[in-house]
Image (cartoon, helix red, strand yellow):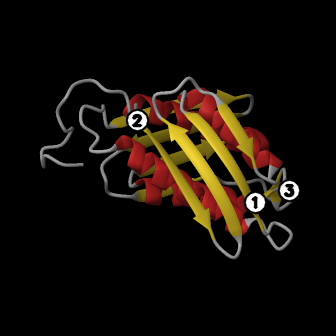
Amino acid sequence: MRSAKTTRKTGETDIRLELNIDGLGKSEIKTPLRFLNHMLENFSKHSRFDLRIIAVGDVDVDDHHLVEDLGICLGEAFQKALGDKRGIKRMAHSIVPMDDARAEVSVDMSGRPYAVVDLPFSEFHEKKVGDVSKENVVHFLESFALNGRFNLNVKVAGKNDHHKVEACFKALAKALYDATRVAGDAVPSTKGVV
């Protein structure tokens, strides 16, 4: 079973996270950021990754520290759970619509972390989507990819900011599910390592 646990305790956050890549999409997400909880529950459901997160942070100051540290922890757990990546498909993509929104996500479990996130938000709305700063949604995705050591490319279009973010998390989930499926026993690289 490909699973991992990670913790992060700083002067700003306290996070305990458990991830099972070969799960059933069960989640228990408890953070003070309800919108992020909703997105992570969607991520778990559509990736079929079991995900348990208990986290607190200084959200009375700003949501930045908790959002960033959650991305870091999820990335670290993801990297640990994948191990040597032997036999995985490695590359995948997904396109997910949600009402007016459409998200395209491509991933490569290459071990070379990089993130390109094109997630434009409406200028006519609040600076937050739910209780999360819009800029921190992008920062979460970048932190996840960089600490998970995978290449992430995201392109989202639409009008409703909630729909755009939710389509993005669902597309990321589906792409990561496909990329992490075991399809053989070889390391999926001409280099012999990923």
Q: Quadrant of residue 147?
A: bottom left
Q: Amino acid at mark 2?
A: Arg
Horizontal side, residue 62 vs residue 166: left or right: right
Q: In front: 170, or 36?
A: 36
Q: Which residue is mark 3?
A: 124
**Distance of mark 1 from mark 3, alpha carbons?**
31 Å
Residue 160 appears in the rendering: no
Q: Residue at x 57, y 58 (%)?
A: 7
**Label 2, residues with CA under 10 Å away: few <14, some 14-19, many ≥20:** some
**Label 1, residues with CA under 10 Å away: few <14, some 14-19, many ≥20:** some
Q: Amino acid at mark 1?
A: Val
Q: Quadrant of residue 37?
A: top right
Q: Which residue is mark 1?
A: 56
**Label 3, residues with CA under 10 Å away: few <14, some 14-19, many ≥20:** few
Q: Is residue 11 above or below residue 35?
A: below
Q: Position of residue 80 (x, y in %)?
A: 40, 49
Q: Position of residue 81 (x, y in %)?
A: 41, 43
Q: Amino acid at mark 3?
A: Phe
Q: Find residue 2 and name its label.
A: 2
Q: In front: 158, or 147?
A: 147
**Distance of mark 2 from mark 3, alpha carbons?**
43 Å
> Dots 1 and 3: beta carbons under 8 Å?
no
Q: Residue at x 29, y 40 (%)?
A: 85
Residue 84 appears in the rendering: yes
Q: Residue at x 32, y 57 (%)?
A: 112
Horizontal side, residue 103 vs residue 185: left or right: right
Q: Position of residue 120 (x, y in %)?
A: 66, 54
Badge 2 element: loop
> Dots 2 and 3: beta carbons under 8 Å?
no
Q: Earlier in the sequence, mark 2 or mark 3?
A: 2
Disc 2 vs disc 3: which is toward the camera? 2
- Which residue is situated farthest in the bottom direction here? 11
